[in-house]
Structure formats: structure tokens, C-alpha cells
Amino acid sequence: MLTGRCLCGSVTFETEAPPKGASVCHCGQCRRQSGHLWASAYVPKTELTITGKVTWFEASETAKRGFCPTCGSFLFWHAPAEDTVSFALGAVDAPTGIHLEKHIFVASKGDYYDISDALKQRD
């Protein structure tokens, strides 16, 4: 069982499904919302149990971002065209057993840092 929560604990989530696609997103929207990068993994939407009130913000037609309305923690990313939900790796209770697989949207990364690990990179 994988569990996680927001900063204040008002929103919790859990899944028994093995997370997939662990990645670090460098897109402008994730950088603006998180303050730097957003690391996430995903599971089937039907396999993620969310408890508490989540506010969903539609940042674009592509996806909605879910956050705690109390503390503001950015917890979820969901594309309506997909049957999965991504969750913030920083919100997962340790030990996670998850390992990053790749960096995504690296063409949009900030100019103030370098990606210096050996993970795969996707523009």
C-alpha cells in the first residue's frame, strides 16, 4: 500500500496499484505551480483513493491539477482523455520504493539549472 498526504493532512491518498512513469516535469506550468519541478508517478484512476476535499484547476485543455484548498499542496494531475491520475512523489509517505525513470518537457526547463543525472530526457 502506497500512501500520501498534503502538507496539512486534510487530503490523503492511497493505492495498492504499482505506480508507473515516475518522472520529473520541467514544463512551465509545473514550474510555476510547484516553484521549481514536479516529480510524479501515475496509477489507474480507479486504483487511487483520495480522501478530503481537492480543488481542481484546469490549467489548460490538456489537464486538470488537484490541490489542497487549505494548505495549497499541488498533489494531482489528470488528463480527462486518460484513465490515469498522477500524484506528487513529494507527498508520498516513505519508504516509497519508487525510482525516477525520466525527465519530461526538458525543452521548457528553466535556464537557472542543469539536468546532470543520467536519466532519460524527453523534450
Image: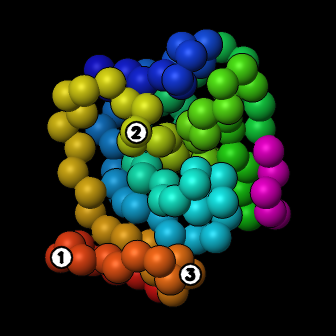
Total marks in image: 3
Number of residues whose C-alpha sits closer than 10 Å to that of mark 1, classed few (under 14), some (14–19) or many (20 or more)? few
Dot 1 lies on which element?
loop
53 in relation to 120, above or below: above
Q: Position of residue 52 (x, y in %)?
A: 65, 14
Q: Verify CB contact (< 8 Å) between mark 1 and mark 2.
A: no
Residue 19 picture quarter: top left
Q: Residue at x 18, y 76 (%)?
A: 118
Q: Can residue 3 be seen by looking at this rendering?
A: yes
Give yes or no for contact between labels 2 and 3 (Cβ–Cβ under 8 Å): no
- The reply, left or right, for residue 1 in relation to residue 64 is left
Q: Judging from the image, what secondary structure is the residue with disc 3 in?
A: helix
Q: Quadrant of the N terminus?
A: top left
Please tell me whether residue 20 is drawn above or below residue 37 in the rendered image.
Answer: above
In primary-sequence order, the first of circles 2 and 3 is 2
On screen, residue 76 versus residue 15, left or right, reads: right
Rendering coords of residue 105 (x, y %): 51, 77
Report which residue position mark 2 lands on: 90
Q: Which residues are magenta?
A: 57-61
Tell me the tag on residue 108: 3
Magenta: predominant secondary structure element?
loop
Picture quadrant where residue 67 is located: top right
Q: Secondary structure at mark 2?
A: helix
